[in-house]
Amino acid sequence: MQRTQVAIIGAGPAGLLLGQLLHKAGIDNIILEARDRAYVEARIRAGVLEQGTVDILRDLGVSERLDREGLVHPGVFVALNGRRRHIDMQRMTGKSVTVYGQTEVTKDLIEARLKTGRPLIFEAHHVSIRDIDGKTPRVRYDVDGGTSQEIVCDVVAGCDGFHGISRPTFPEDSLTVYERVYPFAWLGILSESPPAADELIYARHRRGFALFSMRSPTVTRNYLQCRPDEDLDDWPDDRIWEELRTRLVDPKGESIKEGRIFDKSVLPMRSFVLEPMRHGRLFLAGDAAHIVPPTGAKGLNLAASDVYYLAEAITGYYSSGGESALDAYSDRALSRVWKAQRFSWWMTSMLHPAPDGDPFDNRVRSAELDYVMSSEAAIHSLAENYVGLPF
Ligand code: APR
Ligand code: PHB
């Protein structure tokens, strides 16, 4: 039997960040991860960090490579049927965003974790959580070879993503789920080509949404709206480039530089929130508790704000000995989660023509983008949310 203060399930950004925040506060913790290290480090996800997320990584001393390789973007573009508008976020809000792949954040956090010497257990199988209604919950898992281990702790942090076991551990009658599944998806590609614009371009086009993004001076990340059941075989490289050129049309023809495509995948889009984010001594953070559609680039940033609040709650609990800090966690986290949900849903609705959608809705959404592109007040609001609301 192992004893620790906090058992963290999942070594995605949420679990790893929480581990570092607790370590900094001198709180003992164990991280359990179902997959192996190579798998976790290779998982491709989004790549836009809010200033607040960068600040957390800096405070933790995990930003050396981020400060060197991260691409600071003071602005972003939105486009409607080929017409483009630049949003100078830096001028409007005093903040910028940093483009740095979540994959890289994960690698940096794993390296930092290993340096602390605190346990990070990969390939922990059949993880289960018990006794969350009492003050000493337990976490059981199997290691390779089949030996069972048990951790006794004060708090369990469920950071195991959308498909983890933490959320299903909540008694069903204790929670409310809010959900929306969208009738479209994104086809994401990575290519060996230099970014052809300095900043991201979010484009609504008659043929569907497209997003131009990047990972580094030599790697471009692009997305195209597609069907949720899209067959990748229907998307040979030529078709992808043609469609990107059409939807991201640029009068100077500069937004697209072709290159070898080395990854293609289809990303489903959903909005999902579970309330409350805590039952007894089990606290959820990140994708375990909520999913946003990727249009606002909020997924990783919400995981960061959740664990920031959760670390404060746990630190407060140990310093005061009372439950009030723990009791405040769910409401505090959800207040920010819902604002990011609203923004992600709004960006998604405004930027995607819904196939077979209500024609009136589609016109109104197109008009909404047209309005945003012509109104300082509206574009200011977009900028304020995009760079991230304060913690
Ligand atoms: N036991 C242990 N670990 C588990 C289990 C389990 N039963 N189930 C899942 N995991 C691990 C996954 O392998 C993964 O490494 O939990 C981790 C969860 O990580 P993420 O899915 O990355 O979720 P989170 O850390 O909340 O990060 C949110 O990731 O999904 C993106 O878009 C999302 O950017 C956002 C960010
Ligand atoms: C990405 O670069 O992967 C990316 C950027 C912006 C988004 C989503 C994904 O909104």
Image (cartoon, rainbow, N blue to C red):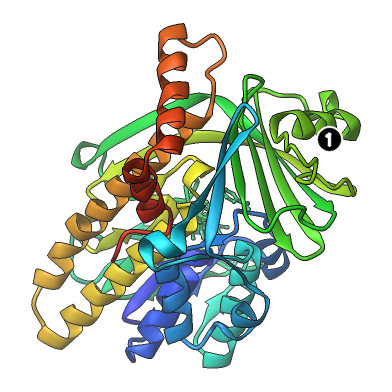
* Residue 352 sits above or below residue 134 on the image: above
Residue to which mark 1 is pinned: 241
Q: Position of residue 151 (x, y in %)?
A: 39, 74
Look at 54% across and 78% down and name the residue there: 120
Look at 40% across and 18% down and name the residue there: 364
User: Within 10 Å of the Cα at label 1, are there few (<14), some (14-19), or many (20+) other Cα atoms?
Assistant: some
Q: Is residue 134 left or right of residue 216?
A: left
Q: Is residue 391 left or right of residue 297?
A: left
> Quick check: can you spot residue 349?
no
The N terminus lies in quadrant:
bottom left
Task: Pick the residue in front: 264 or 6.
Answer: 264
Quarter location, residue 353: top right
Look at 53% across and 67% down and name the residue there: 11
* Residue 10 sits above or below residue 313 on the image: above
Q: Is residue 45 left or right of residue 324?
A: right
Q: Is residue 292 left or right of residue 330?
A: right
Quarter location, residue 30: bottom left
Amino acid type, mark 1: Trp
The C terminus lies in quadrant:
bottom left
Task: Pick the residue in front: 152 or 357.
Answer: 357
* Residue 142 sits above or below residue 321 on the image: above
* Residue 142 sits above or below residue 191 on the image: below
Q: Position of residue 98 (x, y in %)?
A: 55, 67
Q: Secondary structure at mark 1?
A: helix
Look at 8% across and 77% down and name the residue there: 322
Task: Pick the residue in front: 351 or 83.
Answer: 83
Q: Position of residue 369 (x, y in %)?
A: 45, 31
> Quick check: can you spot residue 55?
yes
Q: Position of residue 26 (x, y in %)?
A: 34, 92
Task: Pick the residue in front: 239 or 162.
Answer: 239
